[in-house]
Image (tube, rainbow, N blue to C red):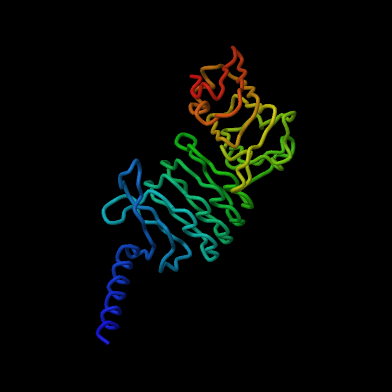
Amino acid sequence: MRKIAFLLSCIMLFGCFFLLTSCGDESGLLFAEYVEEGKVVGYSVTGRGESTATDLVVPETYKGRPVMAIGDSAFLECEALTSVTLPDSIVSVGNTAFKNCTALKRINTPASLKTIGIEAFFGCEALEAFDIPDATIKSIGADAFGGTACITTDEATKTQYVDGWAVRIVDAQSLSWSDVVYLRDDTVGVADGLAATGYDMKNIFFEKVVVPKSVKRLLMNKAFNYKGIEYAGTMEEFKEIAPNLGYTIVTWSSTVTCTDGEIRFSSMTAYPY
């Protein structure tokens, strides 16, 4: 009996410890430490916890530190959620963070947002609009906005757009080395998940992508392989809109054709500029 009582006491103590470390403030949300370069710099929301809010307000701080991220699958299939207010401290929305939140109509965009994960808002069919922060965004994952009300299809280019950003090529899997991808003349940005579908990040190949001068940010990844880019601006202008291009293309030799010359790079020259 003493052994059983001791074991029960241990279980109760462990349970209390788990609750204390996993549950947060009065919001009822679950939190975990958010780590950058091996250091805890804030907290991430990891789940709904005891929160029953339909109009969710994510707190700016937790335990005296900023809330910096919405974790992977944190609100996956929370079908009752209708609106979300994020604090300015949020820099990342994780993979499938709000996937299939079918009633979600509104979510604000913090000016500090850097990353939108794979399928982050996939299936949020009521989501009417989303403002992508052109100045800070560094990655938009594949199918981040698939099946939302805010995504539109440009039939002429067979490309889907959110807030002026080209986020997905329709039927990208059918592309071949002879195909040219065109973008709308008023395109603001190009997502790194443009030529991929969800978690199927296998290589998509095509001849080249034609980028208009209107583009302010060009984000790329390893699943985005092509022989070249045709850009309607100068080489210096291209370097400004695509500062990390060479780092992410590691397999194929490619050429960026600009109005005043060419930029060449390959797997042997990770940073061409």
Q: Quadrant of residue 77?
A: bottom right
Q: Is residue 101 above or below residue 12?
A: above
Q: Quadrant of the N terminus?
A: bottom left
Q: Is residue 92 above or below residue 24?
A: above
Left or right relative to 90: residue 199? right
User: What is the residue that sits farthest to the bottom in this orientation?
Assistant: 1
Percent across and percent down for residue 242 are 52, 27
Q: What's the residue at 69%, 31% (across, down)?
A: 206
Percent across and percent down for residue 134 are 49, 35
Q: Which residue is nearer to you in this view: 190 or 202?
A: 202
Percent across and percent down for residue 193 are 58, 40
Left or right relative to 116: residue 145? right
Q: Is residue 22 above or below residue 144?
A: below
Left or right relative to 1: residue 179? right
- How many marks the image carries: the answer is 0
Q: What's the residue at 36%, 49% (across, down)?
A: 34
Percent across and percent down for residue 93 are 47, 49
Q: What's the residue at 39%, 62% (across, down)?
A: 29
Q: What's the residue at 66%, 44% (across, down)?
A: 152
User: What is the residue that sits farthest to the top in this orientation?
Assistant: 260
Q: Which residue is nearer to you in this view: 67 or 195?
A: 195
Q: Quadrant of residue 162?
A: top right
